[in-house]
Amino acid sequence: MTNLETYNKIFRGIFRKTDDELPGLKYRGIALWDSIGHMDLMSELEEAFDIRIDTQDVLAFTSYETGKEVLGKYGVAIE
Amino acid sequence: MNNRDGWRRCRKPDGMEADIFCASDPVTGSGCYLLVKNGTCAVVDAGCFPLPAPALSGHVPAFLPVFLTHGHCDHISALNSLREHFPVLTVCSRACSEEIQDTKANMSRRMEAFLYYKSNETKLTPYAPFRCGPADLCFEEEIRFLLGGWRLHMKRLPGHTPGSSVISLDGALFSGDYLLPGERVVTRLPGGSQEQYETYTRPWLQTIAEGTWIYPGHGREFQMCGEARRFHEL
């Protein structure tokens, strides 16, 4: 499974969306992506990619797209 | 003693021998309960523990039982300090004991961000990740025991976390992060499970007798009633 596939799978699982619905998805843009869903998302991403995301980056992770940039800082290329 | 030194005297069931005091952590709002009976003390959750505390000032008990409802950091953040001050005997489910030893499972690694969101993104409160040593006495599903004059029943009820438990004592029920006034149960945090809540926990909570005093992990104590049942869909 590629990093993108893993990334999308986590988003689909937590936010119950299809791949087509992921682009443009934003924090607080849907009911499930609230602060609690965000904690779950960070936890799943950390486990899947074996990284530890700093608080500042947790806060900077505000959308499906910016999340890719955040993970890039940790050497995880989502392409 | 009311609101003295950070401790508030709670209302309690008729005929209950023990006095119950509560202290709330100003940052997280989590409650710590101190039970006092004939000079002996026990603690339920340790999210904060202001000193001096009722019945503990000026003497160190032979041991201090600390019963944990679950392992989230806002319910255990004073546990390490308590262990330094008193001969603590920590009792919780085995799953809870694992939670308190891990910064991810106890959420302390995420608490800074979580509190920021809870403040409506207005305030970043420093919160250092921490872990605690394992509990001294663990149970798998439930345990009934008499410990230092305290007769308790602890039952694991997963859903909020794998190790979440409720604690029954003389008609009082310490519910942890279940049955919070005005807040529905959260099962979406890491380790939480709506399926387990529906399978094990909700059916058990439905059996709580009318009038039972509930001591939640956040907010004030209340008696089980129709309104609470409706709110929590029990």
Image: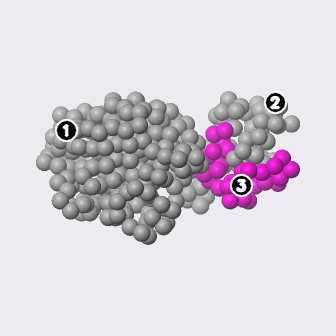
Identify the subunit bearing mark 3.
A
Of B218 and B77, the residue lying toward us: B218
Looking at the image, which residue is at 63% across and 45% down?
Answer: A40
Tell me the kind of residue under disc 1: Gly
**Would you say residue A37 sits in the magenta stretch?**
yes
Kindly tell me whether residue A48 is visible in this rendering. Answer: yes
Left or right of B222? Residue B195 is right
Q: Which mark is residue B148?
A: 1
Question: What kind of element bears circle 1?
Answer: loop
Of B125 and B44, the residue lying toward us: B44
**Would you say residue B92 sits in the magenta stretch?**
no
| Residue B164, placed above or below residue B89 | below
Looking at the image, which residue is at 19% across and 53% down?
Answer: B18
Q: Give the range drawn in magenta.
A: A15-44
Left or right of B165? Residue B122 is right
Tell me the kind of residue under disc 2: Met
Looking at the image, which residue is at 67% across and 55% down?
Answer: A32
Of B123 and B174, the residue lying toward us: B174
Instruction: Provide the residue designation for mark 2.
Output: A1
Query: Badge 1, how many Cα within 10 Å: few under 14, some, many 20+?
Result: few
Looking at the image, which residue is at 73% across and 59% down?
Answer: A29
Tell me the kind of residue under disc 3: Tyr
Foreground label between 1 and 3:
1
